[in-house]
Amino acid sequence: MPTPPVYPDFETSTPAPAASEDDALDPNYTPVFDSGDLSTVQPHFEALLKRRLRQEIAHRPPLFPWEKGLQDYPDALRPGAASIWLDHLKNLSVPGDVPEDVLADLLNQCQQVAQDIRQTGRRLVAAVEGLFPDQPQTLEYIAGLVARPAYRSAQTESLAEVDYPKASIQQQVALAMLAAQGIFEALSLTVGPTTLTQTQTWLTASGVLTVQATYAAAENQLEVKAVLPTDGSLTLISLDETAGSERSTPGELVLRLTTHPGAVHRLDVSLGQTKVAPLSFQVMIAER
């Protein structure tokens, strides 16, 4: 048989011996990998790590503490998706016949804003600024007026004959803020040492939803009771604790949490099996 060719510079796969201490001290010794080569190795390592993390998340997505399994939450309450909650907004004492798509947008924004902003004027601006993105000065001015109860009662009659689509920008801002203020009030429950219980009702496409908050000062405990018009669930969330309950038929659900004066809790109510974002109430514990 012919002798296999021998190629110059061919290296076998035999591992190179580890450097001895004498080699390491030799000024002419050149290691196979220099510390400067880390700049080449590190991006490759990071890419592998990111790929592994993506695989882990895809295989086992993380859950919130109150979730028992994967949930499909919509990004926002769009007019069609939010229709089960919109019936109540049509009964708000807001003049001007605000269009349904505007009410749907306000409902979505008000629920997000209520958890982060306490001051009334700033809340109103944040709730409607998406509808009027180029009117910052007008928003601030009218928010200062709408925040006053006297203005709201005085303007209700004067704006009653206004047609929202044909109204001026200032009138549209005022109408939108009046609607937002009504939504904030309808989604808020405040209890405390002087007001132990408060109840809110919300008209849905399936019937009336009733939510009652009760504060037990001696035990520093908050109890939330809801009567659902259909099957659904409740989730009560605080900074330190989360409670949840659900039922497959119409009826009552009760949740309890430890609380304290000054605390603010979020109550999410979901109805039916439809993939619709929950209705979020704000439950506040007054300090006095």
Image (cartoon, grey):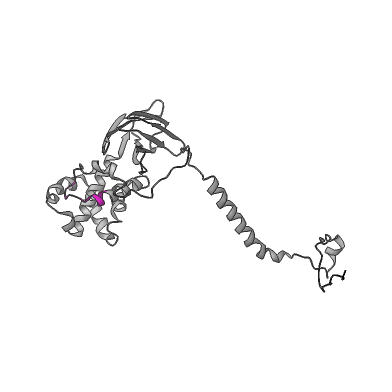
Position above or below: 250 against 97: above
Task: Please give the name of the residue rendered at 28% of the width and 56% of the height, measured from the top-left corner.
Answer: 131
Q: Quadrant of the N terminus?
A: bottom right
- Any part of residue 40 in sight: yes
Task: Please give the name of the residue rendered at 38% of the width and 35% of the height, measured from the top-left corner.
Answer: 234
Magenta-drawn stretch contains 97? yes
Task: Please give the name of the residue rendered at 39% of the width and 32% of the height, measured from the top-left corner.
Answer: 246
Magenta-drawn stretch contains 186? no
The residue nearer to you, when weighing 212 against 6, is 6
Residue 85 placement (x, y as % from top left): 28, 42
Q: Magenta segment, which residues?
A: 94-103
Position above or below: 207 against 37: above
The residue nearer to you, when weighing 140 against 229, is 229
Residue 71 placement (x, y as % from top left): 44, 42
Provide the major secondary structure of the magenta segment: loop
Residue located farthest toward the bottom when viewing the structure as drawn: 8
Residue 269 placement (x, y as % from top left): 35, 37
Q: Quadrant of residue 130?
A: bottom left
Q: Quadrant of the C terminus?
A: top left
